[in-house]
Amino acid sequence: MTPLAGAYAEKPFWWDDAGQQALPEQRPPDSADAVIIGGGYTGVVAGWELARRGQVAVVLEQEHLGFGASTRNGGMVLPGFKAGLQTLLRKFGERGLALARYSLDAVGLVERTIAQQGIDCGYQPSGHLELAYRPSHAAALKASLPAQARVFGDRVRFLERDQLEAEIGSSAYHGGLLVEIGGGLQPAKYHAGLVRAARRAGAIICERTPATGLTRLPGGGFQVVTPGGSVSAAHVLLATNGYTTGLVPAIQRRVLPVGSYLIATEPLEPALARTLSPRGRMFFDTKNFLYYWRLLEDHRMLFGGRASFAPTTVARARDWLYKAMLRVHPQLGGVRVTHAWGGRLGFSLDRLPHIGRIDGITYALAYCGTGVAMATAFGRQAAAFISGEPLPAFLTMDFPPVPLYRGTPWFLPAVGLYYQWRDAMS
Ligand SMILES: Cc1cc2nc3c(=O)[nH]c(=O)nc-3n(C[C@H](O)[C@H](O)[C@H](O)COP(=O)(O)OP(=O)(O)OC[C@H]3O[C@@H](n4cnc5c(N)ncnc54)[C@H](O)[C@@H]3O)c2cc1C
């Protein structure tokens, strides 16, 4: 049984102190230059950038602003992709390298945005450590070092097993790749800061305003239907990532929604916290079903992951995560959980994010679990694209549909079993 605090709640820990003010009720105008569907990092940054360029940009969010992954995530600002650098280089060569460097620039963009806008989101540039779950994974991480150095220069190092104790109070891992880039933030406060910047620039942001229909206008452009009225615009940006539904079937077929879960514990004794994470790194491991975790400023442990792709509940995910946390840090036995929650990731077949246009609709999504930095960058990139700037060539990649997917991912449990098997056998 997972020990629960008296005030245990199944909602994101971040929502207790989200820094978000209630927005005045706003109906969408009749027309705009661009309508952006989805009010997470991608949509809000796109709206901000379009408004900054003097365009009328309307952001529609079906729930409260930031309802999706952007206020539910682990707050790890990371370069790189789920697909991994070796895969990128093998599949795409120099283009892959350009993509990896783009993700590094995306981290810089987040850091500059926080500094320039004065966003109070507790950002700590602590770097991250990818931990090898098996000896074979340690060998692979070590072998990837020359490629990693092409992207991260002298800010990446391989740590042998006996060097890990300076970084983490756990003997569960066989080595690790330390990248002194990126860090941790409070994701809901970061989102709230982006919303403030977008509104200051003049973006029109409509909460609790779902886009329920989308039609092509005879003279060009689109009409987006909402319960509060319809808005016509030359451009539509789909920024719905893991919350993508059938509004644009051709895009839905390319993005699989996958759940991810987190628990937060009560604050730990400072001395214990220091032994778990002496340098406050962002941690994740090398499994397909990875664990990711970090200590928060007030010494809470935040621990995330998921057991399988089969449907589950927050309570079941919480119990599984608690056991997983004790596997990494047995010292935490008995520590109580205060919050547990989940959210949806958007996955593509090639495990890379995608930006482009299908049937005239612009999209920026499929961050596959590393979207804090990339969604910020793609929001801006999508706005530039809508404004007439071409996409850099390395971003114009094939975006294949997921075979057999039409909105019900019935095959995910089987795919999950396959990845579990790979995790067990590697
Ligand atoms: C539990 C969890 C942990 C994560 N941890 C990390 C991490 O530590 N580091 C990292 O880099 N990434 C992490 N991620 C991924 C990251 O949070 C996402 O990639 C990123 O937030 C995506 O932002 P977004 O704006 O594209 O999508 P979202 O923030 O998901 O926003 C999409 C929005 O679209 C809205 N929407 C959908 N359909 C409609 C419609 N028809 N009309 C109006 N609105 C609509 C939804 O309500 C939703 O709010 C995590 C994700 C989860 C779920």
Image (cartoon, helix red, strand yellow):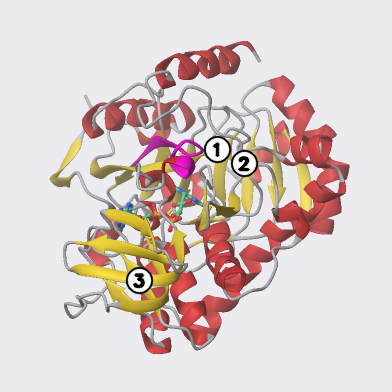
State the residue at coordinates (22%, 31%).
315
**Image quadrant assignment for residue 374:** bottom right
Q: Is residue 224 left or right of residue 384?
A: left
- The amino acid pointed to by label 1 is Ser
Q: Are marks 2 and 1 in contact (CB under 8 Å)?
A: yes
- The amino acid pointed to by label 3 is Ser
Q: Is residue 139 left or right of residue 298?
A: right
Residue 186 visible somewhere in the drawing: no
As helix, strand or loop, the secondary structure at mark 2 comes to: loop
Residue 199 % position (x, y): 36, 83
Residue 195 visible somewhere in the drawing: yes
Count of numbered labels shown in the rendering: 3
**For residue 399, which numbered disc appears in the image?**
2
Pick whichever of labels 2 and 1 is earlier in the sequence: 1
Q: Which residues are magenta?
A: 250-262
- For disc 3, the marked residue is 232
Pick whichever of labels 2 and 3 is earlier in the sequence: 3
Residue 356 % position (x, y): 60, 55
State the residue at coordinates (38%, 81%).
203
